[in-house]
Image (cartoon, rainbow, N blue to C red):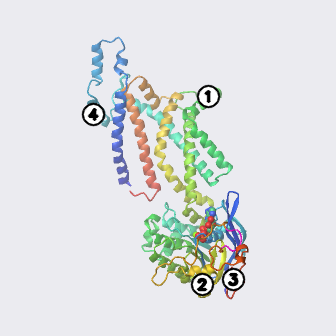
């Protein structure tokens, strides 16, 4: 049996707005197995990035605050360890790449400078050794003319190349976990597939576990071993990918699946899910999905469903009581 | 890089030409006759005419301008009407006195403003931030000459720590440098703070944190260099301010710099001296802009040159 590399238990993260505390993620639990790819999927605003940033302890405070829960990594709770300790983990044991490759690299430092930084910091390499390792990483993520790229600045690279650089940077210290927050969303469709393949390939080569965040079920179908579906700061369905795609249970998951591009590559609207995601704090009682659900019952209006075990899946819906 | 600098210099030429025209015109169209001042009220019309011709003031305006520019290109700013010696000599003698205050004030301003701005931004909405911004607000709203007068009153007249007027030693420098440096720092600190606040929210700063870098590295390496780019751009503008402040304070502290020279020349309608000192002041502001452009290109790799 495989071990968990990361366990998130009852994570709650809120943002303060004036006197109010608006929850962005509530009571979220999931775990990542060694070397697997866990996909987190949900529409924009469902709390995926907040979840990722909470794991890295990079929630901007103020206004954000992790108000509860545990994030267990190697016998320690990442939410309890010192700032120094979490810095030793960031970029070293757990690293992250972001949705915005165009702005995620510092415009005034060279690629080589930025790539070698984590190596110098975490692996105690000299500048020269770090540069050599950076070059190696650039080559392995398929950046052409890698040697020249090391001396170039981010603005001299395309979005796809920058995302490759980000991946090289994130993987350079051989982390246990790579968090990829919508790594392909900002890229052209053709580049998207290349980047996804690269993540898959690097994961297999290095044995890194991947937490892949996306709003696109198509991406999940391609890379995820297990899937967590989030809606409005909550887990609504949690299952292995095969089960989820074969027998989706939560009405929201069903809706998302109908938005996967069909064979012609055309994207259908999410017409099966009417309305839009409520803003956090807008719905305060009952099921968060009640305003958009086709199967809404009286109970859903006032009582929030707990998570039910349904076969191999975990589902937050009264239908499966 | 050299090409970029040359391009910038060429771009300055039309500005310089415009400047000479304006400086030339303002004075020649202004009321008041310098010949009267020289010859005195009792001179005969012949003497008056002779002097006028000697000074070239009888020629058409355009000719006077051409002569002015022609000499200028040879480094000749003409002779002072009153002192009958080359304006260039007078300026060379006086300019260091002004420059000294300007340069030190600029250094003082940056030494105060950059750390203050950074600390205020990093500790946004803290007591420190409020204190710094209150200081900045007071500094911004206080005219340089007023601060100069206050300093003069307390530290020179009342306490006697510094000389009341004159120049030559570092003790003469302290008060005017503080007056300009502090008021300028107030403006710059606000710019550094807002620039820093913007940069701190950028994605690449988050990337730097995600690497595991400590706050010190994140702020002083990744954020600072980006935050200073707009500050460098404004350096040229600040040069103008500082030179202007320096000129005003020469009146307050009675320092015989270029400002003093210019003001005296204006009152005595010594045209060539006024023109020369104005040209020098504006040229030094242009030079400041050029330096800022070069530093900007060095700091920001996205600038193509
Ligand atoms: N910096 C922030 N300040 C205030 N609210 C935030 C901030 N970041 C995220 N939120 C809130 O958290 C919710 C979830 O955001 P996010 O995790 O970014 O969603 P997504 O699933 O699209 O990644 C958003 O609706 C937003 O209201
Ligand atoms: Mg997001």
Residue at image coords 62%, 50%? B120
Q: Badges 4 and 3: C-beta atoms under 8 Å apart?
A: no
* B275 over A32 or under it: above or below: above
- Gap in Å between the C-alphas at discs 4 and 2? 83 Å
Q: Residue A287 in magenta? A: yes
Residue to which mark 3 is pinned: A319
State if disc 2 and disc 3 touch (CB < 8 Å): no
Element type at mark 4: helix
Q: Chain of mark 2?
A: A
Closer to the camera: disc 1 or disc 2?
A: 2
Mark 3 or mark 2: name the one nearer the start of the chain.
Answer: 2
Where disc 1 sits, the SS reads helix
Tell me: A68 left or right of B118. Answer: right
Quadrant, the N terminus of chain A:
bottom right
- In this view, the residue in front, B126 or A128, is B126
Choose between A108 and A148: the one closer to the eye: A108
Q: Position of residue A184 (x, y in %)?
A: 51, 74
Q: Quarter for ligand 2? A: bottom right
Query: Of tags 4 and 2, which is closer to the observer?
Result: 2
Chain where mark 1 sits: B
Quarter location, residue A176: bottom right
Residue at label 4? Answer: B66
**Closer to viewer: mark 1 or mark 3:** 3
Q: Which residues are magenta?
A: A283-288
Mark 1 highlights which residue?
B153
């Amino acid at each position: 049996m495989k071990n968990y590399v990361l366990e998130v238990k009852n994570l709650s993260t809120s943002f303060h707005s004036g006197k109010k505390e608006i929850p962005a993620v509530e009571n979220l639990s999931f775990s990542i197995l060694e070397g697997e790819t866990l996909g987190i999927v949900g529409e924009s605003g469902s709390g995926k990035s907040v979840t990722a940033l909470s794991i890295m302890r990079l929630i901007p405070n103020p206004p954000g605050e992790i108000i509860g829960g545990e994030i267990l990594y190697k016998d320690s709770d990442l939410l309890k360890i010192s700032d120094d300790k979490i810095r030793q983990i960031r970029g070293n044991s757990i690293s992250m790449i972001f949705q915005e490759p165009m702005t995620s690299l510092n415009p005034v430092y060279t690629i080589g400078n930025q790539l070698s930084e984590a190596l110098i910091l975490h692996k105690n390499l000299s500048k020269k050794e770090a540069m050599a390792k950076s070059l190696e990483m650039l080559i392995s993520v398929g950046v052409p003319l890698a040697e020249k790229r090391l001396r170039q600045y981010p603005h001299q690279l395309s979005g796809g190349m920058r995302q490759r650089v980000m991946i090289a940077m994130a993987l350079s210290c051989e982390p246990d976990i790579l968090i990829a927050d919508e790594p392909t969303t900002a890229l052209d469709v053709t580049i998207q597939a290349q980047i996804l393949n690269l993540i898959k390939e690097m994961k297999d080569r290095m044995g890194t576990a991947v937490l892949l965040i996306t709003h696109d079920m198509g991406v999940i179908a391609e890379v995820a071993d297990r899937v967590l579906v989030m809606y409005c700061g909550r887990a609504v369905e949690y299952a292995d990918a095969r089960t989820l795609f074969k027998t989706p249970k939560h009405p929201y998951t069903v809706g998302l699946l109908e938005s996967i591009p069909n064979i012609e590559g055309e994207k259908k609207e999410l017409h099966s899910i009417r309305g839009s995601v409520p803003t956090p704090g807008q719905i305060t009682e009952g099921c968060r999905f009640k305003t958009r659900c086709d199967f809404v019952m009286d109970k859903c209006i006032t009582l929030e469903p707990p998570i039910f075990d349904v076969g191999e899946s975990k589902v937050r819906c009264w239908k499966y009581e | 890089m050299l090409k970029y600098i040359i391009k910038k210099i060429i771009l300055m030429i039309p500005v310089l030409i415009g400047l000479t025209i304006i400086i030339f015109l303002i004075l020649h169209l202004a009321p008041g006759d310098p010949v009267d001042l020289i010859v005195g009220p009792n001179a005969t019309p012949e003497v008056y005419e002779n002097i006028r011709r000697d000074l070239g003031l009888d020629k058409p305006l355009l000719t006077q301008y051409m002569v002015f520019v022609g000499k200028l290109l040879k480094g000749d700013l003409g002779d002072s009407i009153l002192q009958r010696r080359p304006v260039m000599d007078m300026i060379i003698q006086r300019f260091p006195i002004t420059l000294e205050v300007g340069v030190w004030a600029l250094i003082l301003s940056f030494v105060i403003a950059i750390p203050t701005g950074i600390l205020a931004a990093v500790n946004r909405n803290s007591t420190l931030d409020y204190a710094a911004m209150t200081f900045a607000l007071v500094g911004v709203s206080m005219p340089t000459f007023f601060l100069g007068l206050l300093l003069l009153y307390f530290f020179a007249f009342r306490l006697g720590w510094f000389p009341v007027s004159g120049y030559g030693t570092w003790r003469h420098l302290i008060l005017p440098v503080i007056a300009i440096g502090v008021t300028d720092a107030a403006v710059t600190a606000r710019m550094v703070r807002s620039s820093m606040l913007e940069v701190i929210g950028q994605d690449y700063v988050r990337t730097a944190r995600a690497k595991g870098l400590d706050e010190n590295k994140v702020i002083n390496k990744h954020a600072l260099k980006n935050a200073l780019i707009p500050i460098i751009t404004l350096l040229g503008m600040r040069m103008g301010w500082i030179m202007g402040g320096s000129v005003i304070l020469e009146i307050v502290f009675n320092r015989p710099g270029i400002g003093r020279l210019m003001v005296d020349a204006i009152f005595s309608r010594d045209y060539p001296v006024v023109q020369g000192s104005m040209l020098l002041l504006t040229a030094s502001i242009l030079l400041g802009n050029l330096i800022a452009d070069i530093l900007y290109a060095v700091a920001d790799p996205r600038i193509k040159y």
